[in-house]
Image: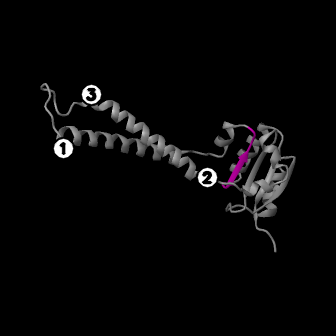
């Protein structure tokens, strides 16, 4: 019984090599890839054209929902359901609504951000196929890896292996599911 392949992984010695390899892979048309390094490298996410627009939109919608919720609850409570005229003050005292509105906006956006990051990253994920790659334990110490996934539309085993070997990595290995 053969194990399905997850992708091909190239191992590099320096972050500059990883950035160059990621840029070359994107220019070659590969889109389903991921990079692994012992520390964050901003240039890699730029080379992969990774944008977190979805997360930004989710947090913005949650913040607006928190703002509207706070204003509606305060207007309902102070002006409609239980209006009290104390000392001739207006029922809709907008400056008094600011602290609660601010707090609910932050609360909703904070919860949305945390929940979205967990869900969008597919966490918790106790197992990932790249853990099977040789030397991958060094990804948290001193090595840099680029994995092109087998479900990429442009992926073809021999052509992708030749492409990765042309980037002069330390080695290229197959990653099984």
Mark found first going from the N terminus, 2 or 1? 1
Labels 2 & 1 near each other (Cβ < 8 A):
no
Q: Nearer the viewer, residue 74 or 150?
A: 74
| Mark 2 and mark 3: Cα distance apart in space | 41 Å
Name the residue tied to disc 1.
81
- Write down the quadrant of residue 139 in the picture: top right
Give the quadrant of the C terminus.
Answer: bottom right
Name the residue tied to disc 2.
123
- Look at the image and say whether residue 34 sits in the magenta stretch: yes
Start-end of magenta stretch: 29-38
Name the residue tied to disc 3.
95
Q: Nearer the viewer, residue 12 or 175?
A: 175
Mark found first going from the N terminus, 1 or 3? 1
Binning the other alpha carbons within 10 Å of mark 1 as few (below 14), some (14 to 19) or many (20 upward) gives few
Q: Residue at x 68, y 60 (%)?
A: 152
Determine the main secondary structure of the stretch shown in magenta. loop
Binning the other alpha carbons within 10 Å of mark 3 as few (below 14), some (14 to 19) or many (20 upward) gives few
């Amino acid at each position: 019984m053969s194990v399905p392949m997850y992708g091909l992984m190239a191992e590099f010695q320096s972050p500059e090599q990883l950035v160059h390899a990621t840029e070359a892979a994107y220019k070659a048309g590969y889109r389903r890839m991921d990079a692994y390094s012992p520390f964050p490298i901003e240039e890699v996410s730029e080379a992969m054209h990774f944008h977190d627009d979805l997360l930004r939109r989710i947090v913005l919608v949650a913040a607006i929902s928190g703002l509207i919720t706070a204003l509606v609850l305060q207007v309902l409570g102070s002006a409609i359901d239980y209006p009290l005229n104390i000392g001739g003050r207006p029922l809709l005292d907008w400056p008094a609504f600011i602290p609660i509105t601010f707090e609910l906006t932050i609360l909703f956006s904070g919860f949305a951000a945390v929940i979205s990051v967990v869900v969008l990253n597919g966490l918790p994920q106790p197992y990932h196929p790249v853990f099977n790659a040789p030397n991958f334990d060094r990804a948290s110490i001193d090595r840099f890896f680029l994995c092109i996934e087998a479900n990429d539309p442009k992926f073809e085993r021999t052509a992708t292996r030749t492409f990765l070997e042309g980037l002069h990595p330390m080695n290229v290995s197959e990653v099984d599911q």
